[in-house]
Image: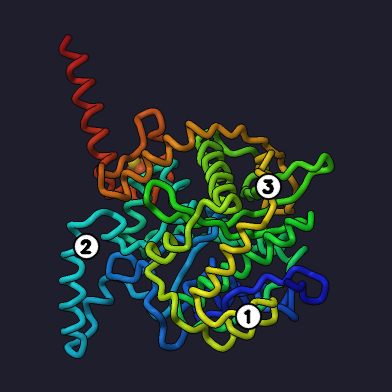
């Protein structure tokens, strides 16, 4: 596979959305030669959009597959609030009826079914580690979640990530015409980066995916590189509004994030993920031909494939022969948003048993094996900054329990 202009060219999806225009414009001004649209930031919706994952009355917003803990995915043509949907007029009656039937069906299903999620992002899990109830409300009330994700502090974090990425790789816009196209772009990026990694080079924004507890997990590793002693290092960048280390609770979710990346990456390069697993989870059509731009790009990258199935075969064949070491070091770098200075770096100890146990617990919620759980009383401070505090039934229940306990203590 060839690099273009001697640099790793990371091809991303061009999606015509108005939502992120001002953000994009500012980046286009900084980098006039490169479009900076990325599939992780926006759903791949075109003029006549493919159905977006999570696109129903409940889930007009979905968390992104990018895993900075700050990213958003939005789809302009589906960005109506539930109340807007209910006002869609008589012409949409049949559609509304079918939507409401579907909604009724989904309401009885597992959270994965209910929110129409074919996969989860690693960010979903790290958000769960903070407060699972908050994740649930974010899906139920996507317009509120959207406000959270549109906050300036979140945008600033995304900008720093993007600037870092552009230090070593270009981003090229590509029109996509289907979900298969969107995933093809991710897979081509993955294969391209793996080959650079094999050649001993640094890669950034590496997509990873794998099956955990019967659920497809997708993530993006900020950076993989070799240290001076030849160890393979995973580096995760976290940006901060204050020049301080995050709380222990926040760091705990970051530790989970980098540990899950390691698990996913290593399963991939060891060839443990199977082609059928991806196809079945994502419900993609292997025989579907790529759109013209994706086809052209695949050719430019030296991949002579016409369909999604052919691309998958090629990727999995490559993974059989590829020799990439396991990740030796997990590092998190904290960076101050105001001046991009480094606050500090943390090395995370990988504890596989603990991570696997945590994953099992978090996935059991998505599989409908238990209800969403809010924070414990010791972490009630998290509720103070939560946008769902006013409606949170978990919080209400805990408050009532505390009052009852106090009364009982008083009577003794
Ligand atoms: Fe979680 Fe507290 Fe927010 Fe409820 S109010 S969702 S328990 S952080």
> Which quarter of the rendered image does ligand 1 occupy?
top left
The image shows residue 326 at horizontal and vertical percentages of 65, 44
Within 10 Å of disc 3 (Cα), the crowding (few <14, some 14-19, many 20+) is many
What separation in Å lies between label 2 and label 3 (alpha carbons)? 38 Å
Cα distance between the residues tagged 1 and 2: 40 Å
What secondary structure is marked by label 3?
Answer: strand
Residue occupying image coordinates x 61% and y 73%: 12
State the residue in front, 395 or 28: 28
Numbered badge on residue 106: 2
- Number of residue marks: 3
The residue positioned 17% from the left and 17% from the top of the image is 408
Looking at the rendered structure, which numbered label has been put on residue 358?
Answer: none
Does the image show residue 156?
no
Give me the C-alpha separation between circle 1 and circle 3. 33 Å
- In the displayed structure image, the side of residue 70 where residue 399 appears, left or right: left
Coordinates of residue 321 in the picture (x, y in percent)? 66, 57
Q: Secondary structure at mark 2?
A: helix
Mark identifier at residue 304: 1
What residue do we see at 74% from left, 73% from top?
A: 30
**Vertically, is 360 above or below 339?**
above
Task: Tell me which corner region of the image, top left, top right, bottom left or bottom right, holds residue 198.
Answer: bottom right
- The first of marks 1 and 2 along the sequence is 2
Label 2 CA crowd tier, 10 Å (few <14, some 14–19, many 20+): some
Q: From the image, which quarter does the N terminus lie in? A: bottom right
Q: Nearer the viewer, residue 344 or 170?
A: 170
- Whether pointer 1 and pointer 3 mark residues with C-beta atoms closer than 8 Å, the reply is no
Q: Say which residue appears at 32% left-offset and 53% top-offset.
A: 137
User: As displayed, is residue 231 above or below residue 106?
Assistant: above
Residue occupied by mark 3 = 235
């Amino acid at each position: 596979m060839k690099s273009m202009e001697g640099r790793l060219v990371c091809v991303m999806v061009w999606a015509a959305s108005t939502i992120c225009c001002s953000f994009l414009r500012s980046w286009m001004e900084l980098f006039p030669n490169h479009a900076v649209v990325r599939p992780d930031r926006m759903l791949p919706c075109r003029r006549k959009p493919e159905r977006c994952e999570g696109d129903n009355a409940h889930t007009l917003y979905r968390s992104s597959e990018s895993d900075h803990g700050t990213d958003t995915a939005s789809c302009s043509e589906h960005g109506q609030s539930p109340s807007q949907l209910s006002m869609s007029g008589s012409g949409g009656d049949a559609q509304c009826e079918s939507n409401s039937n579907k909604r009724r069906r989904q309401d009885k299903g597992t959270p994965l079914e209910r929110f129409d999620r074919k996969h989860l992002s690693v960010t979903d899990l790290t958000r769960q580690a903070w407060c699972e109830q908050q994740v649930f409300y974010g899906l139920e009330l996507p317009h509120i979640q959207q406000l959270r994700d549109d906050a300036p502090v979140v945008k600033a974090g995304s900008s720093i990530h993007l600037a870092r990425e552009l230090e070593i790789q270009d981003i090229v816009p590509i029109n996509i015409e289907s979900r298969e196209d969107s995933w093809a772009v991710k897979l081509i990026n993955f294969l391209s980066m793996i080959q650079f990694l094999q050649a001993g080079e640094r890669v950034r924004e590496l997509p990873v995916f794998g099956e955990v507890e019967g659920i497809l997990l997708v993530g993006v590793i900020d950076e993989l590189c070799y240290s001076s002693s030849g160890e393979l290092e995973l580096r995760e960048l976290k940006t901060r509004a204050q020049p301080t280390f995050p709380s222990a609770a926040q760091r705990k979710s970051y530790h989970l994030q980098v540990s899950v990346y390691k698990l996913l990456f290593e399963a991939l390069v060891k060839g443990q993920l199977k082609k059928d697993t991806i196809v079945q989870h994502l419900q993609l059509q292997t025989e579907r031909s790529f759109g013209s731009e994706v086809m052209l790009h695949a050719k430019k990258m030296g991949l002579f494939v016409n369909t999604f199935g052919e691309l998958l075969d090629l990727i999995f064949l490559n993974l059989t022969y590829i020799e990439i070491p396991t990740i030796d070091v997990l590092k998190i770098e904290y960076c101050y948003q105001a001046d991009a200075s480094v606050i500090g770096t943390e090395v995370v100890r990988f504890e596989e048993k603990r991570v696997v146990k945590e994953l099992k617990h978090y996935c059991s919620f998505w599989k409908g094996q238990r209800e969403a759980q809010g924070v414990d009383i010791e972490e009630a401070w998290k509720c103070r900054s939560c946008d769902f505090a006013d409606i949170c039934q978990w919080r209400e229940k805990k408050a009532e329990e505390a009052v009852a306990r106090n009364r009982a203590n008083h009577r003794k």
